[in-house]
């Protein structure tokens, strides 16, 4: 799941799109590059997110898994995703 895009299904951030940067048994850690950065990700229960199967860049999940990304790249990928769904 690490490196995939996910949408929040519950909470005050409902419908917000994030990148999964870390996964544990029951929780995932999410970043959006702005408020929730790689250094301070959002901890969210797995049952409160919806995985998004499309990627603006196919190699992006591998870069996240390898730790080769930064907040600027996360912002750029999320913006590309937002533009692709509004077409």
Image: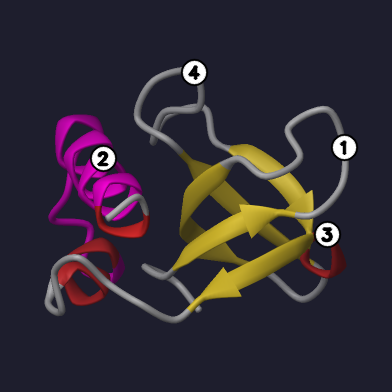
- Given residues 55 and 70, the one toward you in this image is 55
Alpha carbon distance from label 2 to label 4: 15 Å
Tell whether label 1 touches label 2 (CB within 8 Å): no
Give whichever of discs 2 and 3 has the lower sequence position.
3
Give whichever of discs 2 and 4 has the lower sequence position.
4
**Residue on which disc 3 sits:** 48
Picture coordinates of residue 13, whole percent (x, y): 73, 32
Alpha carbon distance from label 2 to label 3: 22 Å
Q: Residue furthest top?
A: 35
Tell whether label 4 touches label 1 (CB within 8 Å): no
**Residue on which disc 4 sits:** 35
Magenta segment: 65-83
Alpha carbon distance from label 3 to label 1: 8 Å
Label 2 CA crowd tier, 10 Å (few <14, some 14–19, many 20+): few
Picture coordinates of residue 15, whole percent (x, y): 67, 45
Front label number (1 vs 4): 1
Q: In the rendered view, would you say 72 is above or below 62? A: above
Q: In the rendered view, would you say 2 is above or below 7? A: below
**Residue on which disc 2 sits:** 79
**Residue on which disc 1 sits:** 11
């Amino acid at each position: 799941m690490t490196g995939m895009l996910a949408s929040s299904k519950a909470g005050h951030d409902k419908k917000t799109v994030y990148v999964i940067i870390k996964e544990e048994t029951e929780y995932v850690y999410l970043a959006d590059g702005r408020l929730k950065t790689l250094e301070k990700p959002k901890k969210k229960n797995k049952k409160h997110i919806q995985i998004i199967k499309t990627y603006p860049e196919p190699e992006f999940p591998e870069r996240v898994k390898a730790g080769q990304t930064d907040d600027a790249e996360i912002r750029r990928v999320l913006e590309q995703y937002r533009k692709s769904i509004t077409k």
